[in-house]
C-alpha cells in the first residue's frame, strides 16, 4: 500500500508542476491512517462546496519526529498535518501553527458539531503556551497504548502488566512500537507503580518528568528487554502478530483492533490489554502549519474528515477510533451480539453509559480512569531520542560488528587466496 501511495504521490507531484498552488492540497498523515477512497471524494466535494478545483498530494510518515523535522527544519509547505498531542504542544509553543478558521459559509461545520466533549477537554489541557490547542488543532483519531498478545501462548494474567515485555518465556516473540515517547511513558508508569499507589507521585506528574533519573531508569529497563525483542516496528507489528511470528506487542489500540479482526479470520486468538499499572491515552489532530500555502483547502479537508460518514469509513478501514462524538458514529459501532455493554458516557454523553461496543476501539470509563496523557518535553526531547537510540542501537551494533567481521574475514581470505594463486602461476612461468 505504501508503494502505491508513493507512486500516486509522485504522479500527483508531477501533475502539480502544471497546476497552480491554490489548486493543490498537500496532506502529510501517518501511514495506514485513512480510507484512501475518501481522498478523491474530498476533491469532488471541495469543488461542489467552493466551486474551486483541487488535487490532493498525499504523503505519509511513520514517526512523529520525522514529520516534525520536515516542518521545523525543512520548512516544507505541507498544508495540513496530523501530529500527536505532545507534538501539537511543541508546534504551538514554537509558533509553527495557524489558527483554524471555522467559517465555511453554506457548508456545515462538522468539526464543532461533532467533537466529543472528552476530546475537547483533553485538548484544553494541552500546554500550548498562551494558546488553546482547540483553536489550532482538530482531533482526528485517538487511542491507547497497550499490550496486544496471542492467547495461545500468553495468559491474560501475564498480559495484565507492562512487565510482560521482560518475560524471557516470550524471547524473540516480542515486538515493540518504535515510538520512544510512548514506550517511555508506559515503562515509567510500570517502574513507579508502587510510588503511584503510595500517593508519592501521580500518573500525570510522571508524564512531565524528563529528569536524568527517569531516563536512566527506563533505559536500564529497556536494555533488559532488548535481547528478547524480535523487532522495533512502526507499522509491521500488526502483521507479525496475525501471522503468529510475534506473541506480545507493545502497540497502539488501532493496530490492535486491525490485527484482532484479521487474526479472527485465520482462527488466531489475539487480545489486547490495558495494563493494571495504568497507561497513556494519545490524540492525533489535524493542524495547519505556518508554511502552508493553501489554507482554505486545508480547513475544508479538516471539516470533511470530521463528517460522520467519512469518520465511519476511516475508522472501519484503519481500526483507529475517531474523536467524533456524533450519535451516528456510536450507532455504527454498536454490536449487541458480539460485545458486552461498556460505559462510554465520558465520550458520547450520559445516554451511552451501557453500550455494546468493542472495548479495544473505545476504552470503558473504568479503564480511562487509570489513564494519563503525554506532554511535550521541550529542550529535553533530544535526551529521550538519544536514550532510545542507545536502547535500540546497541542491539544493531552487536549484529553489525558480527556482519562486518565476517565480511572482512571473507575479503582477507579472498585476497590471500588470490595472492597464493598468482604466486604459484608466476613461479610456474619462471620455471
Ligand atoms: C497508524 C498510525 C497511528 C498513529 N499507522 C498513532 N499515534
Image (cartoon, grey):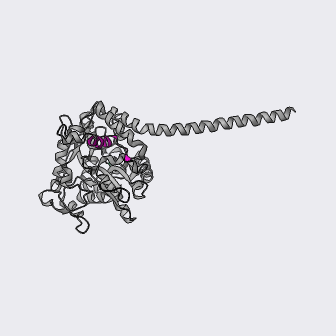
Q: Where is the C terminus found, in terms of image quarters?
A: top right
Q: Residue at x 37, y 33 (%)?
A: 386
In this view, the residue in front, 28 or 84, is: 84
Q: Which quadrant of the view contains residue 422?
A: top right
In this view, the residue in front, 320 or 55, is: 320
Q: Residue at x 39, y 39 (%)?
A: 223
**Is 240 inside the magenta-drawn segment?**
no
Residue 32 location in percent, x, y? Answer: 36, 53
Residue 147 location in percent, x, y? Answer: 32, 51
Q: Is residue 180 visible?
A: yes
Q: Is residue 126 visible?
A: no
Q: Where is the N terminus found, in terms of image quarters?
A: bottom left
Position of 345 compared to 186: left or right? left
Position of 187 compared to 121: left or right? right
In this view, the residue in front, 97 or 122, is: 122
In this view, the residue in front, 256 or 194, is: 194
Looking at the picture, does residue 96 appear above or below residue 328? above
Position of 116 compared to 141: left or right? left
**Is 188 inside the magenta-drawn segment?**
yes
**Magenta extent:** 176-190
Residue 117 location in percent, x, y? Answer: 15, 51
Looking at the picture, does residue 164 appear above or below residue 184? below
Residue 395 location in percent, x, y? Answer: 45, 39
Taking the view exactly as shown, the residue that stands out farthest to the right is 431
Q: Residue at x 24, y 58 (%)?
A: 359
Amino acid at each position: 500500500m505504501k508503494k502505491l501511495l508513493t507512486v500516486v504521490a509522485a504522479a500527483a507531484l508531477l501533475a502539480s508542476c502544471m497546476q497552480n498552488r491554490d489548486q493543490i492540497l498537500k496532506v502529510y498523515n501517518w501511514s495506514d491512517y485513512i480510507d484512501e477512497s475518501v481522498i478523491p471524494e474530498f476533491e469532488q466535494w471541495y469543488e461542489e462546496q467552493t466551486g474551486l478545483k483541487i488535487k490532493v498530494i498525499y504523503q505519509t510518515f511513520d514517526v512523529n519526529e520525522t514529520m516534525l523535522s520536515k516542518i521545523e527544519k525543512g520548512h516544507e509547505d505541507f498544508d495540513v498535518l496530523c501530529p500527536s498531542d505532545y507534538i501539537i504542544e511543541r508546534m504551538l509553543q514554537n509558533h509553527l501553527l495557524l489558527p483554524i478558521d471555522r467559517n465555511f459559509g453554506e457548508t456545515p461545520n462538522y468539526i464543532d458539531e461533532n467533537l466529543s466533549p472528552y476530546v475537547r477537554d483533553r485538548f484544553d489541557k494541552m500546554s500550548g503556551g498562551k494558546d488553546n490547542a482547540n483553536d489550532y488543532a482538530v482531533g482526528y483519531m485517538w487511542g491507547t497504548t497497550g499490550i496486544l498478545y496471542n492467547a495461545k501462548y500468553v495468559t491474560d494474567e501475564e498480559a495484565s502488566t507492562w512487565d510482560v515485555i521482560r518475560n524471557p518465556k516470550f524471547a524473540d516473540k516480542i515486538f515493540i512500537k518504535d515510538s520512544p515517547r510512548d514506550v517511555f511513558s508506559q515503562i515509567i508508569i510500570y517502574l513507579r507503580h508502587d510510588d503511584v499507589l503510595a500517593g508519592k507521585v501521580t500518573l500525570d506528574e510522571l508524564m512531565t518528568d524528563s529528569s536524568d533519573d527517569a531516563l536512566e531508569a527506563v533505559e536500564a529497563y529497556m536494555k533488559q528487554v532488548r535481547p528478547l525483542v524480535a523487532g522495533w516496528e512502526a507499522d509491521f507489528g500488526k502483521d507479525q502478530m496475525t501471522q503468529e511470528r510475534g506473541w506480545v506487542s507493545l502497540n497502539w489500540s488501532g493496530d490492535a483492533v486491525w490485527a484482532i479482526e484479521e487474526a479472527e479470520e485465520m482462527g488466531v486468538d489475539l487480545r489486547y490489554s490495558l495494563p493494571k499499572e495504568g497507561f497513556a491515552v494519545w490524540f492525533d489532530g489535524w493542524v495547519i502549519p505556518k508554511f502552508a500555502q493553501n489554507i482554505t483547502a486545508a480547513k475544508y479537508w479538516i471539516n470533511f474528515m470530521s463528517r460522520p460518514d467519512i469518520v465511519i469509513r476511516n475508522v472501519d478501514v484503519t481500526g483507529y477510533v475517531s474523536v467524533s462524538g456524533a450519535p451516528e458514529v456510536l450507532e455504527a459501532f454498536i454490536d449487541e451480539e458480539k460485545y458486552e455493554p461498556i460505559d462510554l458516557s465520558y465520550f458520547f454523553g450520559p445516554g451511552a453509559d451501557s453500550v455494546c461496543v468493542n472495548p479495544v476501539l473505545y476504552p470503558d470509563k473504568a479503564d480511562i480512569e487509570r489513564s494519563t496523557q503525554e506532554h511535550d518535553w521541550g529542550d529535553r526531547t533530544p535526551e529521550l531520542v538519544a536514550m532510545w537510540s542507545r536502547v535500540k542501537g546497541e542491539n544493531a551494533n552487536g549484529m553489525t560488528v558480527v556482519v562486518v567481521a565476517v565480511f572482512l574475514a571473507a575479503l582477507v581470505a579472498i585476497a590471500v587466496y588470490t595472492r597464493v594463486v598468482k604466486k604459484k602461476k608466476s613461479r610456474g612461468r619462471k620455471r
